[in-house]
């Protein structure tokens, strides 16, 4: 499956063909694929502005093994207290790292799984869509106003 990353305006909720013709600030733009828009919109409504939201599947080993590495990444651009969203669903993790040597930082929520296609009709892409939907459902359990308030209170 071809995954297409494009700019999406979280404020206008539209795909942006060119930043030159779109009037919103670049702070409202995220590089994402279409399946991740639900997560992006939910986080943005909570006051968390993603910069990149993408997923990938990589076939591991021989083609007959049907073993895949599934990765879903949401770069949120800044470290937030884990108390803001609380404990993430199983398999999802916060990643706060300083990447050397340029000392750039990584602020990400991600899911990584080794997935085996056991031949029950589910593809790796179907598994990704299921994981994305589960994370959207999790975000729907968060109170947007409470998350915004916590972000404000915990701002340094």
Image (spheres, rainbow, N blue to C red):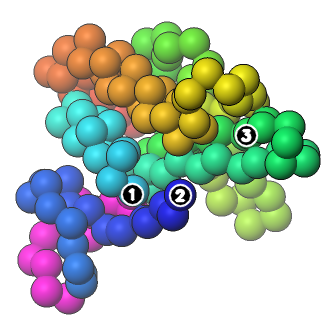
Q: Residue tagged by mark 3?
A: 69
Task: Kindly state the secondary structure of the residue where label 2 is placed.
Answer: loop
Give whichever of discs 2 and 1 has the lower sequence position.
Answer: 2
Q: Are marks 2 and 1 in contact (CB under 8 Å)?
A: no
Determine whether 30 is above or below 19 in the image. above
Magenta highlight range: 20-32
Front-lying residue, 25 or 113: 113
Label 2 or label 1, whichever lies nearer to me, is 2
Q: Is residue 104 visible?
A: yes
Label 1 or label 3, whichever lies nearer to me, is 3
Q: What residue appears at the point 26 percent right and 62 percent down from the top-left corner?
A: 8
Quadrant for residue 141, please give it: top left
| Residue 50 horizontal side relative to residue 72, left or right | left
| Residue 10 horizontal side relative to residue 81, left or right | left
**x, y percentage for residue 156?**
39, 36
**x, y percentage for residue 129?**
43, 35
Quadrant for residue 153, please give it: top left
Front-lying residue, 135 or 131: 131
Task: Kindly state the secondary structure of the residue where label 1 is placed.
Answer: strand
Task: Kindly state the secondary structure of the residue where label 3 is placed.
Answer: strand
Query: Dot 1 surroundings within 10 Å: few (below 14), some, or many (20 or more)?
Result: many
Determine whether 33 is above or below 149 in the image. below
Determine whether 13 is above or below 37 in the image. below
| Residue 152 horizontal side relative to residue 73, left or right | left
Q: CA distance from mark 2 to mark 1?
A: 16 Å
Q: Residue 32's mark? A: 1
Front-lying residue, 151 or 113: 113
Q: Residue tagged by mark 2?
A: 1
Give whichever of discs 1 and 3 has the lower sequence position.
Answer: 1
């Amino acid at each position: 499956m071809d995954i297409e990353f494009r700019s999406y305006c979280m404020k206008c909720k539209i795909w942006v063909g060119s930043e030159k013709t779109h009037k919103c600030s670049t702070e409202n733009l995220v590089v994402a694929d279409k399946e991740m828009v639900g997560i992006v919109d939910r986080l943005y409504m909570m006051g968390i502005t993603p910069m990149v939201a993408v997923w990938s599947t990589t076939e591991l080993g021989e083609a007959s093994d049907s073993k895949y590495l599934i990765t879903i990444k949401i770069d949120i651009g800044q470290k937030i207290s884990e108390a803001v969203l609380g404990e993430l669903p199983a398999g999802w993790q916060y990643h706060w790292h300083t990447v050397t040597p340029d000392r750039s930082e990584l602020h990400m929520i991600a899911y990584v799984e080794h997935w085996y296609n056991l031949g029950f009709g589910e593809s790796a892409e179907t598994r990704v869509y299921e994981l994305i939907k589960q994370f959207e459902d999790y975000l729907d359990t968060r109170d947007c106003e409470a998350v915004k308030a916590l972000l404000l209170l915990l701002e340094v």
